[in-house]
Image (cartoon, helix red, strand yellow):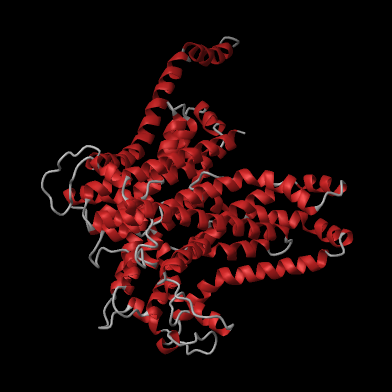
Amino acid sequence: MAVSVDEAVSTGPARDHTAPARRPGGRGRSVLEVALLTVLAVVMLFPVLWMIETSIKENRDVYAIPAKLFDFTVTLEHYKDVFVASDGGRSALSVSFLNSVVVAGASTVLATVLGVPAAWAYSRFAVKAKKDQLFFILSTRFMPPVVVVIPIFLMYRQVGLIDNKLGLILIYTAFNVPFTIWMMKGFVDEVPAEYEDAAMLDGYTRLQAFWRYTLPLLVPGIAATAVFALIFSWNEFVFATFLTSSDSVRTAPPAIAGLIGGTTTDWGLVAAASVVFALPVLVFAYLVRKHLIAGVTLGAVRR
Amino acid sequence: MSEPVPLTTDHPGQVASATPPAPGRSRRLSDRWLAVTFISPAMLLLLAMSVFPLLWALYLSFTDYSATRGGPANFIGFGNYTAILTSAQVHTRALTTLIYVVGAVGLQTVLGFGIAYLISRRTHGRGVLTTLFLVPMMLSPVVVGLFWRFMLDAQFGVVNSMLGSIGLGQVEWLTRQRTALLSLIVVDTWQWTPFIMLIALAGLTAVPKYLYEAASIDRASEWFRFRTITLPLVWPLLLIAVMFRAIEAFRLFDLVYILTNGGPGVSTETLSFHIYKVAFLGFNTGTASAYGILMVLVVIVLTQFYLRYLNKLKEG
């Protein structure tokens, strides 16, 4: 996105001047394009706005037929319900949010600790069959979760990791390590190896050179990579729903999905819980917007 | 007085000339040691959590093991595989998955590229526009699935409400066979169009401006410029995005699980969802494993195509 903003600034004026001069129909077309973009933007954003609106609507407005777009009564009841149980204690949802923080946080830290050194090693050293190893690593990330979860379920049942946060942390780490390695390798490649060579001429060992010279330069990259790993773990649903069951272990995605289990669904609560759940992701995604392309393609595409 | 000066300069020189081979060798040795210690923990985790489970699934796929019945797993050879490959049920799911993948990824590509093209032609507010368009992509499939389920509700859903206000009839989006699969495609398209858009936009902004200038000097038509300059230059990157999305769409499970739960009937059951039913509702662990292994094979082939292409693009 940084690219697009820069381009807009540098080439903007030139186009502005030439386009209308050459083509008389240019302005009409431009208006049409803006209108089209606006319509598309409204369509894309409407569900999100509707979700926010539903989360602050009184229940009878939520189920109004036809749907009320503007004149509804505002309430914060649904948000209260997300965090506070009907008996005044902590709600099951708020516990699941806390579990999500623990699981996503721990798995991100682990994936970073394991992935960053590996990425550095792949970038700097002549490793045997490097390309094949890197391909293999990324391939593991493409495995269908539903297929992987069957043997993982049996494996965890043997060692008592079913319905256990550690089990989720381990599987999320395994799913984030390939991403971390691919993403970080790109960042390490951008730091000239000569920095380390120079440090080694000064008498540092390779490890010290990495620690003192390369690692500090990688910090922004590590932060961006960790944010993506955090988002992936936070949003993950399949493993969470099949490997956990009790309220004290369950993460937020299956807990929110569980809200629609019964005969009636409190859609206001679902909306409020979804907003609370999605908000941190959007904030984090905004922080790493410069690396979004690399992030969403698992580090495969860099521009 | 002249003696100490050459001594001090000579001394380190001598040491240096005598020692290079030794640190050189130990450095190479320690480099290899360092590479191994840095890579192996990550590799071991992947072997334990990804490769070992798949090997276990491969073993189970040749047996009649059931996770609930317990008891010993009897070896039944390729029985599970032939059963799956000849099953009409599986063929139906494969067709559903194919329709879904082609429909959703096709729509996303056209829409995503279209939006990217429109944005790239704007001079102001590109950053804001891009950011707004990207929101759906960052949401969890749980949130997306639940929310669209609410919006597509036949009675109080906002979509039918809007259709009603412009004089159109009500549609039972999620409870009719045809429309349920269509709804699934629409929701997936809503979520993932931004993905294609993001990558297409990167490609579009990377097209050198002088090419367009040269073309406009030649008085080339807009369509000609698009066809001969824009599309060929953006296509390689766009293909990466399309292949990536196709692999992801092929594995789709969570959106189906939440939006339609496979129904009505089996009209929205994808292959992933069917595996889930065989494994966790039918408890035919052996059959489900064989089913899963077949799916993994397809994914591996697709991933290899994707990675080879990616590699070619990077080197070229």
Q: Is residue B46 left or right of residue A68?
A: left
Spot occupied by residue A199 in the image (x, y as percentages of width and height):
52, 31
The answer to which quarter of the image holds residue B118 is bottom right
Q: Residue at x 32, y 43 (%)?
A: B293
Q: In this view, does A41 lie above or below B215?
A: below
The N terminus of chain B sits in image quarter? top right
Q: Is residue B21 left or right of residue B40?
A: right
So how many labels did they put on this image? 0
Q: In this view, does A66 lie above or below A163?
A: below
Q: Residue at x 21, y 55 (%)?
A: B283
Q: Is residue B209 left or right of residue B175?
A: right
Camera-side residue of B143 and A188: B143
Q: Is residue A238 above or below residue B22?
A: below
Spot occupied by residue A192 in the image (x, y as percentages of width and height):
57, 35
Q: Which residue is drawn at 68% across and 51% down?
A: B205
Spot occupied by residue B197 in the image (x, y as percentages of width and height):
60, 56
Spot occupied by residue B260 in the image (x, y as percentages of width and height):
38, 67
Q: Is residue B126 above or below residue A173?
A: below
Examine the rendering and report whether any part of residue A18 can be seen.
Answer: yes
Q: Residue pushed farthest right?
A: A21
Q: Is residue A237 left or right of residue B187?
A: left
The C terminus of chain B sits in image quarter? top right
Camera-side residue of B217 and A167: B217
Examine the rendering and report whether any part of residue A115 can be seen.
Answer: no
Q: Residue pushed farthest left?
A: B71
